[in-house]
Amino acid sequence: MASADVYPASEPARWKYLDNVRTRSGPHTNPDIFDGKLVAEAMENMKVLVIGAGGLGCEILKNLALSGFKNIHVIDMDTIDISNLNRQFLFRQADVGSFKAEVAARFVERRVKGVKITPHNCKIQDFDEDFYMQFQLLVCGLDSIEARRWINATLVNMVDEDAEDSYKPLIDGGTEGFKGQARVIIPTVTSCIECQLDMHAPRAAVPLCTLASIPRQPEHCIEWAHVIAWDKEKPFPSLDKDDPEHITWLYQKALIRAHEFKIPGVTYALTQGVVKNIIPAIAATNSVIAAACCNEALKIAANCAPCLGFPDENNYMMYSGNDSIYTYTFRHEKKDDCPVCGNLARELIVDPDWTLRELVESFAVRPESQLKKPSIRSDHKTLYMQSPASLEAKSRPNLDKTLAELGLSSGDEIGVTDPAFATVSFKYKLKLQK
Amino acid sequence: MLKIWSMKKEQQKAENAEGAAGGKKKKVTAAQLRVQKDLSELSLGTTMTTEFPDPDDILSFILYIEPDEGMYYGGRFSFTFNITPNFPHEPPKVQCREKIYHPNIDLEGKVCLNILREDWKPVLNLNAVIVGLQFLFLEPNASDPLNKEAAEDLRQNREAFKRNVRAAMNGYTVKGEAFDKVMIQ
């Protein structure tokens, strides 16, 4: 390859090879939906949301911008810490303390002409469905399972069978040391993050009694200081994991305990790592996973090649570099009893003058439920629980109140469970009409 | 481009999703629904009761255990349950509210029960946890000590340990430590 091709002198040259890939059909392109002439324009009009502007997020933003996406939004609530600079390459020392989303957006806009990146310095939970509805594609580079579950449930709930654009494909990347995964979720169509919750190993915990009686590793001493000594002595009203004074207190405690049991290796940095549950991040793993995610984004957007996540196709790529190198791509099945996508809220037309008792009894005759002992809650209110006894007693007076008196209104969601249906729970969205 | 719609149609799965349009604000979360399900399947028997300080918040409650046999017979022990929005990915946080003499429960009320920490799995439910707690009172376990002195006591001399348990349950001092009175009047 001539050096002139490596360093494109002009903008058209920069996109030449990308256009070769995305505008030409291949043996696996779907002729029904692929049209090479429309690709560039379609991708320019597409709004993509990147969630997270950290280790994965920096890579994702760079990759999407270089893959021909022109309108990108990015959300991250965090500010830049000095320890991020080794791998979050869009940030410089002078940026420490600034918002990640903002700095990342400006950097990529500067480097790739014609890309517009809109930063949002906040939590994903600060936005509602109207906000997420404007995007055609989401790419996640998150480090928290809680945030993943939230965005997943939000996207599943947004699906409206009659509206094509309410299906928002979600591409999720994640890394931990040398391991990682890339997956594509098409809400309600393919298995969702909640279905796949068991793919995330819960944080490896050490038995409390090991911490209390026979610590063997420096981490045990630190965890002991964190969960046992802190609660006992309460040196500060509440533990702030970002306060150096608090970490120092834990470090000193851990050090004393380590001396007692002759365990070497307790350091301030390790204390911080254990207490904040910092997972070692390896820059190159982030690159591998982000690259996989963004190639899927390109393929989904352009339809130029089959992507992960098509119904009845593979949707999950796991990558492991711990022991040599291994990748495996498979289809994670949708779970029928998934609490998020397995039972979407059905519409339930009710009369606001009904008492709760009438509603409870109505579930016995509804064909899809036929519940004998239903318990009912809305998101913030226990309407009627058949068990345990104390909750039954407290919620029993609600039975004689009308739905209107209980403050229920149209659009409220209720969850209905019954011990006779061990694996299924039902969700209904109320529609009040007389 | 981006024709997800045609994919969905190909699937020909019309069973789900009748509702799900319009103003959707108040969603029942997966954690809430799971806790609701777990609670409605709870089998407390005659030795356990619950208390919900705020009945609308099912993520925090108190469990009372009154063992009807074993060396903790006659006592009434209470545990706070706090369930995070990350349930069932994370186990519930459980703590004993009384200061008791037990090899697997420390003086601050921390409980050493494998399924509350290292062996928790999302397939386990609240019933598994309460069965585990109940078991701790029937079979205190000296090999997983959280209160080392109590464990040592149990290992050395089971009868002496039993006497110390009774003393502690009656609110006396054992080995220089004053305990809460937990005997049912």
Image: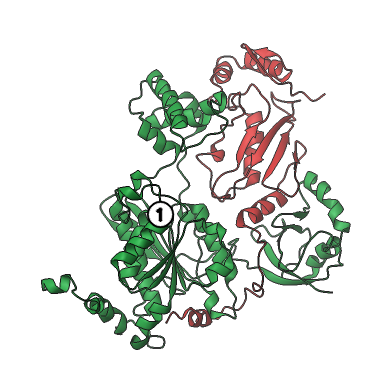
Chain colours: A green, B red
Q: Nearer the viewer, residue A368 or A36?
A: A36
User: Which residue: 62% across, 24% down?
Assistant: B102
The answer to whether residue A249 is above or below residue A88 is: above
Residue A160 falls in image quadrant: bottom right
Instruction: List the residue tagged with mark 1.
Output: A100
Q: Chain of mark 1?
A: A
User: Which residue: 47% across, 28% down?
Assistant: A225
Q: Quadrant of the N terminus of chain A?
A: bottom left
User: Which residue: 29% across, 65% down?
Assistant: A111
Q: Which residue is at the far top?
A: B176
- The three-letter code of the residue at mark 1 reads Lys
Q: Nearer the viewer, residue B19 or B117?
A: B19
Q: Nearer the viewer, residue A288 or A336?
A: A288
Residue B19 falls in image quadrant: bottom right
* SS assignment at label 1: helix
Percent position of residue A137, x then y? 45, 71
User: Which residue: 31% across, 83% down?
Assistant: A23
Q: Horizontally, is A188 left or right of A404 in the view? A: left
Q: Residues within 10 Å of mark 1 (few under 14, many from 20)?
A: many
Q: Which residue is at the far right?
A: A400
Please state the total of marks drawn on the protein image. 1
Percent position of residue B160, x then y? 63, 13
Residue A364 falls in image quadrant: bottom right
Residue B10 visible: yes
Percent position of residue A227, x then y? 52, 31
Q: Nearer the viewer, residue B22 or A394?
A: B22
Percent position of residue B86, x then y? 56, 50
Q: Quadrant of the C terminus of chain A?
A: bottom right
Residue A210 visible: no
The answer to whether residue A27 is above or below residue A140 is: below
